Amino acid sequence: MAFTFSKQVLADVLSWACIGSIILVWYVRMCNKQQGLHAKGIQLLKLEQR
């Protein structure tokens, strides 16, 4: 009984770890995109100031 329960918990933990890693990767990519846009915006401002 305890063994099957721990198996189920392990399966849940693994599936949550998968979902969590996917979300983390997506979040990091979104942050990188926004930083890239921010850097481009700064470059445009510098060009306008010249």
Image (cartoon, helix red, strand yellow):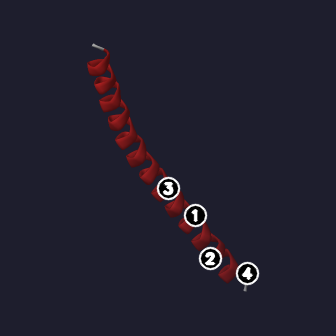
Residue 34's quadrant in the figure?
bottom right
Q: Earlier in the sequence, mark 1 or mark 4?
A: 1
The residue at the point 39 percent across, 40 percent down is 17
- Name the image quarter holding the C terminus: bottom right
Crowdedness near tag 4: few (<14), some (14–19) or many (≥20) residues, C-alpha within 10 Å: few
**Amino acid on which disc 2 is placed:** Leu
Q: Which residue is mark 2?
A: 44
Instruction: State yes or no: discs 4 and 2 in contact (Cβ < 8 Å).
Output: no
Q: Secondary structure at mark 4?
A: helix
Q: Which residue is mark 1?
A: 35
Crowdedness near tag 1: few (<14), some (14–19) or many (≥20) residues, C-alpha within 10 Å: few
Instruction: State yes or no: discs 4 and 3 in contact (Cβ < 8 Å).
Output: no
Q: Which mark is residue 28?
A: 3
Q: Position of residue 5 (x, y in %)?
A: 31, 18
Q: Nearer the viewer, residue 8 or 43?
A: 8
Q: Is residue 34 left or right of residue 16?
A: right
Distance between the Cα atoms at labels 4 and 2?
9 Å
**Amino acid on which disc 1 is placed:** Gln
Q: Nearer the viewer, residue 23 or 33?
A: 23
The residue at the point 46 percent across, 58 percent down is 29
The residue at the point 38 percent across, 48 percent down is 22
**Amino acid on which disc 3 is placed:** Val
Q: Nearer the viewer, residue 34 or 6?
A: 6
Q: Earlier in the sequence, mark 2 or mark 3?
A: 3
Q: Which residue is mark 4?
A: 49
Residue at the far bottom: name it.
Answer: 50
- Name the image quarter holding the N terminus: top left
Q: Nearer the viewer, mark 1 or mark 3?
A: 3
Residue 2's quadrant in the figure?
top left
